[in-house]
Amino acid sequence: MENILRQQIEKIVPLTDSEFLFVLSHFSVGNYKKHQYIVQQENPVPYVHFVVKGLLKSFYVDKSGKSHILQFAMKDWWITDNQGFYNEQNATLNIDCIEDAQTYYITLDNREKLCAELQKMEFFFLQKMTAGNIALQNRILSLMSKNSEERYMQFLQLYPDLIHRIPKTLIASYLGISRETLSRLSH
Amino acid sequence: MENILRQQIEKIVPLTDSEFLFVLSHFSVGNYKKHQYIVQQENPVPYVHFVVKGLLKSFYVDKSGKSHILQFAMKDWWITDNQGFYNEQNATLNIDCIEDAQTYYITLDNREKLCAELQKMEFFFLQKMTAGNIALQNRILSLMSKNSEERYMQFLQLYPDLIHRIPKTLIASYLGISRETLSRLSH
DNA sequence: GCATTAACGTGATATATATCACAAATTATC
DNA sequence: GATAATTTGTGATATATATCACGTTAATGC
């Protein structure tokens, strides 16, 4: 039970040892260096990653060249470019490592095989996707109804672990405000 | 094949007649009047609704009393307060009818039973939830990277049918801008 | 059909936040 | 451990958008 992926799945559905080995056999392990890209705009998105350790971010670069962070992903989080991965299109997002990272990653094919063969994994992914939906909706409402300071406070409360690992510049980019404005808030 | 729910499901998974009847037996039909609430902040959220006809909106009322529209739902769309429904909590959102509406609605229990008994329905819901995720992520990026005018243009392009059915005030509230600003754009 | 309510447009002004610019402090890297 | 690169703070200014206020038009409901 020391495997972090197993722990995460078992928060939602129980697994026998052999079931977990079966699950795991559909994944590969990847090791990545700080600054390394694992998904690049305009390129295919072959995998969804489950982060074992380290820290990554997904971000969109708009036409004026500005970056907007969609997601951070630390231990225990899933990350990919959903649109690219699930629709088998080229990425509109980039994903790179803020810290050296290790992930379990899986292809769409393997994910589908896994779900077909082990019904409870489909349930697991549905639960995860649902939780993701709720989080995204809350983020939208936050962007629409809160000012910079309130959004920053909410971030502090939601992700206290991240504050010390991520430069303010990136937090600003996640919150949709300029780094200067964030700097003037933080104290 | 004249049933709109069946059509929607069959876009993703094929159904036999008896399978569809089985699916349908898990739903009830609701008829609602313009201005009628089907979900209210602070109250339970017993159902997710599939819209057969009419038009609804879900919205959040912030502490200053301002409304922010999270979603419109017309024919063929699903709507609920996800957080309330899936976590069996009281609603943080409201949902009401912009036009008289008819829905198929289903409880969480029935939805789970249905998925357990008919595997392909779980796949269907997972696909829908995934598509929803992608849309929400795009909306977040739009809020962060586009100005009012660009967001309005994007809305026009994405939902051309809605423009003529929804007052500009509501579109502004969906886009996260004031009705005056939208008015100054629209022409 | 008339009264009420909602929707819309538009001016004047306020305000939050972005942008530009620069220096200081901190962190990474060979 | 020294050099380069990144991060951070802060002033001055610009700007998009919100807010307030009012009149007009259109839609709704009995």
Image: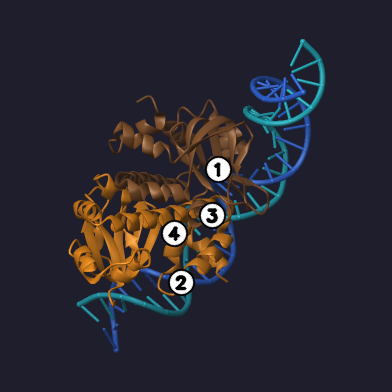
Chain colours: A brown, B orange, C blue, D cyan
Question: Can you give x and y, in whole percent of width and height, for residue A16 in the image?
Answer: 29, 33
Q: Quadrant of the C terminus of chain A?
A: top right
**Structural crowding at the residue carrying mark 3, measured as other residues with C-alpha within 10 Å and reported as few (<14), some (14–19) or many (≥20):** some
Whether residue A152 is visible here, answered yes or no, is no
> Which of the 4 quarters of the picture holds residue B31?
bottom left
Q: Mark 3 or mark 4: which is in front? A: 3
Q: Is residue B160 above or below residue B118?
A: below
Per the image, the residue denoted by label 2 is B163
Can you identify the residue that label 1 sits on?
A: A58
Residue at screen point 37% across, 67% down: B11
Q: Nearer the viewer, residue A85 or B15?
A: B15
In-image side of A183 versus B49 (left or right) = right
Report the Cα–Cα distance between label 2 and label 4: 12 Å
Q: Nearer the viewer, residue B112 or D21?
A: B112
Q: Chain of mark 3?
A: B
Residues tagged by mark 2 and mark 4 found on one chain of the structure: yes
Residue position marked by numbered label 4 in the rendering: B174
Q: Residue at x 25, y 54 (%)?
A: B115
**In terms of sequence position, does the residue under pointer 2 or pointer 4 come before the other?**
2
Lower sequence index among marks 3 and 4 = 3
Q: CA distance from mark 2 to mark 3?
A: 19 Å
Amino acid carrying mark 4 in the image: Tyr
- Cα gap from disc 3 to disc 1, whole angstroms: 15 Å
Q: Which mark is residue B142?
A: 3
In the displayed structure, D2 sits above or below B61; it is above
Residue nearest the viewer, comparing A46 with B5: A46
- Mark 1 and mark 3 in contact (Cβ < 8 Å)? no
Looking at the picture, how far across and down is residue A162, in whole percent?
A: 50, 29
Q: Is residue B24 visible?
A: yes
Q: Quarter of the image containing the N terminus of chain A?
A: top left
Secondary structure of residue under mark 2:
loop
